[in-house]
Image (spheres, grey):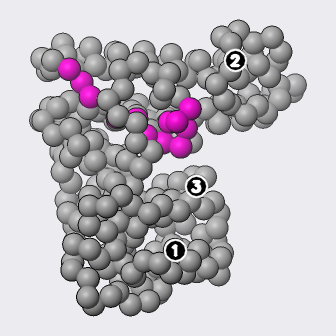
């Protein structure tokens, strides 16, 4: 697949691939336009034929990418995906990692274990809220908190199970509790076992995230003298949980993709 020679460098397509534990999202960025986004099951990367079909359809109406980045929390899928993309487009694939040039200072004891998705999210947070402290919350398979101070230095984070993992654990680790799809319950208190599980997980996660945001913001205000703290929420389940949270500056399910594209452009 060849890129169009008539396009300016700013208009050429950049392909960003975010490989998660459950879902892989592919996004085509060009210029300052909103990306074109397609999602598939991450297990599909084990089938090169199926992925070739997906990519062929994806680029049928777009020019071939001049640059590619993979942001992955699944090493095996990243390796397979990288080899496939390089064979299709003859473009080197950038893998998001802590050794790249970053727009923030990563003060972390084990930078090689810092997730690529968290790096991309911190990069976008620091870009979006430059000069301000930020709490970035990713509500996905896991729920992560990552905190940057106003100087753009990484202050620390938290990792906890996501809502689907909680529901699955209740089912798999008990003899009688059913597997329950988590959505916003009709009321706070359930009147059946399924309703009790749904309410317990949904409202438990909402209140836990709210409480942690408040505690982190208080620490930033007390220790750094910040007058206010920005809160960015993303992730596959952000649409479910984020509307119930209080102090949220922005909800953007594409924040990790945008951060990956930012790091791609910074490291070309």
- Residue drawn at point x = 53 percent, y = 62 percent: 38
> Which is closer to the viewer, label 3 or label 1?
1
Mark 3 touches mark 2? (CB < 8 Å): no
Q: Is residue 116 visible?
A: no
Looking at the image, residue 10 sits to the left or right of residue 180; the answer is: left
**Residue 73 colored magenta?**
no
Query: Residue 23 shows which numbered tag?
Result: 3
Specify the segment rendered in magenta: 228-240
Give the percent coordinates (x, y) of residue 224: 14, 20
Which disc, if any, is residue 186? 2
Dividing the picture into quadrants, the one containing residue 225 is top left
Q: Quadrant of residue 213?
A: top left
**Mark 2 closeness class: few <14, some 14–19, many ≥20 residues within 10 Å:** few
Q: Which mark is residue 58?
A: 1
Q: 200 above or below 12?
A: above
| Image x and y of residue 183, in percent | 66, 29
Q: Which residue is located at x 35 percent, y 65 percent?
A: 29
Going from N to C along the chain, the mark reached first, 2 or 1, is 1
* SS at mark 1 in the image: helix
Looking at the rendered structure, the secondary structure element under dot 2 is: loop
> What's the distance in space between the residues labelled 2 and 1, CA to CA?
39 Å
The percent position of residue 251, horizontal first and vertical second, equals 40, 36
Pick the quarter of the image with the C terminus.
Answer: bottom left
On the question of residue 222 being in view, the answer is yes
Asked if labels 1 and 2 touch by Cβ distance under 8 angstroms, the answer is no
Spatial separation of the CA atoms under disc 3 and disc 2: 28 Å
Q: Residues within 10 Å of mark 1 (few under 14, many from 20)?
A: some
The stretch drawn in magenta includes residue 231:
yes
């Amino acid at each position: 697949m060849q890129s169009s020679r008539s396009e300016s460098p700013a208009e050429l397509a950049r392909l960003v691939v975010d490989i998660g534990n459950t879902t892989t999202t592919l996004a085509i960025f060009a210029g300052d336009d909103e990306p074109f986004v397609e999602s598939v099951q991450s297990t599909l990367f084990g089938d090169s034929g199926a992925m070739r079909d997906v990519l062929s359809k994806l680029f049928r109406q777009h020019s071939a990418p001049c640059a590619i980045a993979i942001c992955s929390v699944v090493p095996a899928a990243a390796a397979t995906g990288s080899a496939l993309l390089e064979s299709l487009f003859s473009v080197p694939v950038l893998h998001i990692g802590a050794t790249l040039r970053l727009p923030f200072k990563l003060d972390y004891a084990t930078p090689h274990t810092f997730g690529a998705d968290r790096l991309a999210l911190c990069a976008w947070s620091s870009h979006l809220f430059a000069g301000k402290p930020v709490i970035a919350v990713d509500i996905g398979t896991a729920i992560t908190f990552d905190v940057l101070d106003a100087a753009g230095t990484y202050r620390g984070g938290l990792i906890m199970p996501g809502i689907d993992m909680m529901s699955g654990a209740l089912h798999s680790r008990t003899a009688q509790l059913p597997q329950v799809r988590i959505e916003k319950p009709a009321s706070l208190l359930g009147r059946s076992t399924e309703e009790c599980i749904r309410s317990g997980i949904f409202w438990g996660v909402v209140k836990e995230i709210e409480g942690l945001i408040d505690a982190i913001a208080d620490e930033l205000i007390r220790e750094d003298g910040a007058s206010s703290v920005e809160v960015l929420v993303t992730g596959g389940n952000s649409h479910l949980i984020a509307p119930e949270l209080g102090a949220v500056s922005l909800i953007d399910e594409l924040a990790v993709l945008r951060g990956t594209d930012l790091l791609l452009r910074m490291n070309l």
